[in-house]
Image: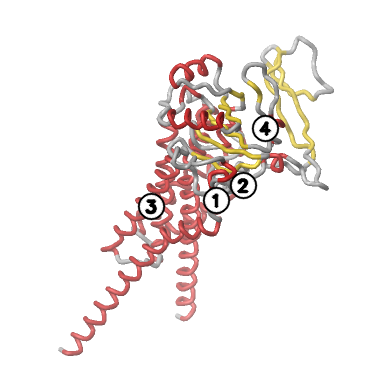
Amino acid sequence: MENSRLTHKANVVWTNFCRFALGVVFIFSGFVKADDPYGMVYKIEDYFRAFGWDSFLPSFLPLFLSCLLAIFEFTLGVYLFFGIRKRLTSIAITLVMVLMTPFTLYLALANPVSDCGCFGDAVVLTNWETFWKNVVLLFFALWLFRNYRLVVKFISKKNQWIISMYGIFYSLAIVYYCISYLPIFDFRPYYIGANIKEQMSIPEGEQPPVYDTTFIMEKDGVRKEFTLDEYPDSTWTFVDTKLYVKEEGYEPPIKDFALMTKDTGDDVTEQILSDTTYTFLLISPYLALADDGSIDLINELYDYSVENNYHFYCVTASPDEEVEQWKDRTGAEYPYLMGDEIMLKTMIRSNPGLMLLKGGTIINKWSNQNMPDEYALTGRLENIPLGQVQQFSLNYRLGIVFLWFFAPLLLFTLVDNWYHLYKARKSRRQKREI
């Protein structure tokens, strides 16, 4: 009898550990996706290209799926954490893990994309690391599915809808804010206050990785890999190259930052990063897809830059015809630079977005929705707050996010438990009086 009681207690403890572990992972995964919706959009587009689906799927689908996935994962994590709809939640989490585990095994074996993107840029895992992580989570989910009745709930069944709706509302609000403006937490190397030159350099004493390149060649329908020393004769047709890490080493956070003039192709990277005055970079990977809703503010910013002898460039990966169409549509007079599409998407999650540099340091960033206006540009940048690095501390941002998430949920939980405790005591008192 005693052993049976101990076994039951151990099962309760382990089941709730599995429940909390899954809940925390899904809340975190959902939050980082909500914090950077466009980052997940680019990852979904990578999947579509890898599977050959990009040519026939609608263009709005990646953003829709990105938002839906963030809200679903976050809400599922809240359900797990608070013990809401225990049976339904255990079925849902098990189905998710049963689907995702073999899928990530395929990713690890075939490697169509470099990483799955499950935790965004916050925690980058290799495909094999993601697979083994999912194996552990699948085990937790299966245990929970079998023992969901042992989950300890924090809130009564009658009031579970309050926690549920708040979780959905909270994740939806984060998604909306970060789409309209910029991520609350910028996990990429182009964050406010970062010096791009320093992010590109290798610290003293560190060695860069050593790579080995192989060439994939084809002849008579047969494909083979060759090293540089084994490069075959002209009867073989070049197909692709593969890069292998021969020796591990330090990789700088920024590896691909390069800017060139649109007209002549001259490299102006060092010139811009070494400029001790201010430089505005209007960043648009593709001008044909850029939102022109703030174009008047952008043109005023360019005029302000000219008047105060600051530099202003539009950096894009667009072909010349798209640049000319943008000029015709907006009346833009600023000069243009060329940059890699992936680099530009990494620099800022807005199209267009604005970045202010000084001496290679990122002073500020703005989305298309909150470009600085005449009320902010009241003088030279040297003398106004706009020209100084202004970023709420990490602890402050974490505090605000946690406060708005946990404080209401904790309040709901305490009130619910107090109410049911009060009702139970009142019922016992009435029985004694009878």
Location of mark 1 (residue): 391
Location of mark 4 (residue): 272
Residue 273: x %, y % from top left? 68, 35
Location of mark 2 (residue): 193
Crowding near the residue tagged with mark 3, few <14, some 14–19, many ≥20 C-alpha atoms within 10 Å: some
In percent of the image, x 26 and y 63: which residue is there?
158
Residue 119 seen: no
In-image side of 330 versus 347 (left or right): left
Q: Amino acid at mark 4?
A: Ile
Q: Amino acid at mark 1?
A: Gln
Cα–Cα span, label 3 and label 2: 28 Å
Q: Label 3, secondary structure: give it.
A: helix
Pointer 2 with pointer 1, Cβ within 8 A: yes
Q: Considering depth in this image, is 12 or 239 the residue closer to the camera?
A: 239
Residue with the most extreme bottom position: 433
For the C terminus, give its image quadrant. Answer: bottom left
Residue 261 seen: yes
Q: Considering depth in this image, is 253 or 391 the residue closer to the camera?
A: 391
Q: Amino acid at mark 3?
A: Tyr
Q: Amino acid at mark 2?
A: Gly
Residue 161: x %, y % from top left? 29, 57
Cα–Cα span, label 2 and label 1: 8 Å
Crowding near the residue tagged with mark 4, few <14, some 14–19, many ≥20 C-alpha atoms within 10 Å: some
Q: Nearer the viewer, mark 3 or mark 2?
A: 2
Location of mark 3 (residue): 170
Q: Earlier in the sequence, mark 3 or mark 2?
A: 3
Q: Earlier in the sequence, mark 4 or mark 1?
A: 4
In percent of the image, x 51 and y 37: which residue is there?
349
Q: Label 2, secondary structure: give it.
A: loop
